[in-house]
Image (spheres, rainbow, N blue to C red):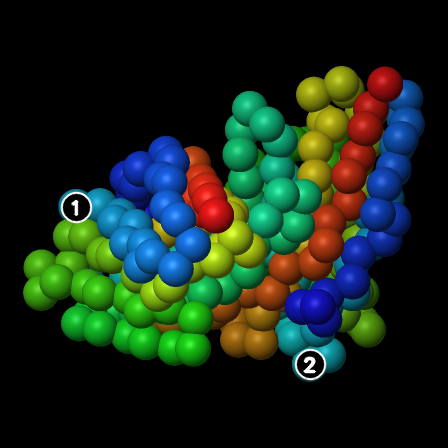
C-alpha cells in the first residue's frame, strides 16, 4: 500500500476555503485516493474518493493531478464544526485485494472564529 | 449516525482479564472490520470478516480473536489484557467485499487498570 504524507496540522478561519494536500509518490495503477474525517472520540467518516482529475460532492472536492502522485482535499467555507483530523488513504478498491484501511497520522485542522 | 452499533461504550477492567466487544454492522453489509486507536499507535487495522469468514488480518495480537456470526454481528475478544491494550476499538462495515467507503461505529473505550 502506498505511503502517504500530509501536514500534521493546519489552521484556518471560519468562511475560508481550506486545501489539504497529500503526497503519495508510490501510488499504484489500481489505487484510489480516499479521505476520511475524524472528530475526537468518534469513528472516522468517509468524505470523498477519487481516482483521477476532480471529484466533487456536497461536502468537499478532491483534485488529483495527471501523475496522481499527490491529491488535494478542498473544503469550501469551513466552519468551526469542521475542526477535525483529516486522513488521506491510498489503496485498491476492487479486485482481489483486501480492503483494510491504512491510516497515517492525519492532518489536524483547527478552524477559528 | 452511521448505522453501525457497538457495545459497550465504555469498559474498565483489570490486567489479565478477558473482555468481549460487540459490533452490529449496517443492515445488509457483509464486511466487518475492527480497528484499534491508541494515542501512541494511531488508528490500526486489526481484522476483517466477510460473510462469516476471515478475510484479512492486520496488526492483531495472538491474545485477540474475532468472529462473525450468521446474523453478521461480530465480536472481538481480548484476553490476558495488558495496560497497553487500553484504547478505542472501532468496528466498521461496508457493503462490498472490497470497498473503501467504510462506515464506522461509535467505538468502545477500553481502559485496563
Q: Nearer the viewer, residue B23 or B111?
A: B111
Apparent side of residue A17 relative to residue A13 in the rendered image (left or right):
left
Residue B104 at x, y = what percent?
63, 59
Mark in front: 2 vs 1: 1
Q: Do labels 2 and 1 share a chain?
A: no
Question: Which residue in the protein does label 2 denote?
Answer: B28
**Numbered marks: total:** 2
What residue is rendered at 59% in x and 27% in y? B39
Out of B47 and A35, give the one closest to the viewer.
Answer: A35
Question: Residue at position x 31%, y 59% from top?
Answer: A17
Is B10 situated above or below A32? above
Q: Where is residue B49 in the image (x, y as percent from the top left)?
A: 64, 60
For numbered disc 2, what is the local secondary structure? Answer: loop
**Callout 2: few (<14), some (14-19), or many (20+) C-alpha neighbours within 10 Å?**
few
Q: State the residue at coordinates (87%, 37%).
A: B11
The image position of residue B66, as x and y in percent, is: 74, 49
Residue named by callout 1? A25
Amino acid at each position: 500500500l502506498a505511503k502517504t504524507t500530509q501536514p500534521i496540522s493546519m489552521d484556518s478561519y471560519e468562511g475560508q476555503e481550506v486545501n489539504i494536500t497529500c503526497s503519495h509518490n508510490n501510488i499504484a495503477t489500481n489505487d484510489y485516493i480516499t479521505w476520511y474525517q475524524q472528530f475526537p472520540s468518534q469513528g472516522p467518516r468517509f468524505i470523498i474518493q477519487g481516482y483521477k482529475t476532480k471529484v466533487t460532492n456536497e461536502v468537499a472536492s478532491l483534485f488529483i493531478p495527471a501523475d496522481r502522485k499527490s491529491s488535494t482535499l478542498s473544503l469550501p467555507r469551513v466552519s468551526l464544526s469542521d475542526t477535525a483530523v483529516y486522513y488521506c488513504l491510498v489503496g485498491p478498491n476492487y479486485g482481489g485485494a483486501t480492503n483494510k484501511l491504512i491510516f497515517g497520522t492525519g492532518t489536524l485542522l483547527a478552524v477559528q472564529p | 449516525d452511521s448505522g453501525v452499533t457497538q457495545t459497550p461504550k465504555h469498559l474498565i477492567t483489570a490486567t489479565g482479564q478477558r473482555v468481549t466487544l460487540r459490533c452490529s454492522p449496517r443492515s445488509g453489509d457483509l464486511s466487518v472490520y475492527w480497528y484499534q486507536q491508541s494515542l501512541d499507535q494511531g488508528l490500526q487495522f486489526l481484522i476483517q470478516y466477510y460473510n462469516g469468514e476471515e478475510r484479512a488480518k492486520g496488526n492483531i495480537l495472538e491474545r485477540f480473536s474475532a468472529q462473525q456470526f450468521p446474523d453478521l454481528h461480530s465480536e472481538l475478544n481480548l484476553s490476558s489484557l495488558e495496560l497497553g491494550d487500553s484504547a478505542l476499538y472501532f468496528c466498521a462495515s461496508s457493503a462490498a467485499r472490497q470497498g473503501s467507503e467504510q462506515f464506522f461505529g461509535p467505538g468502545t473505550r477500553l481502559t485496563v487498570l
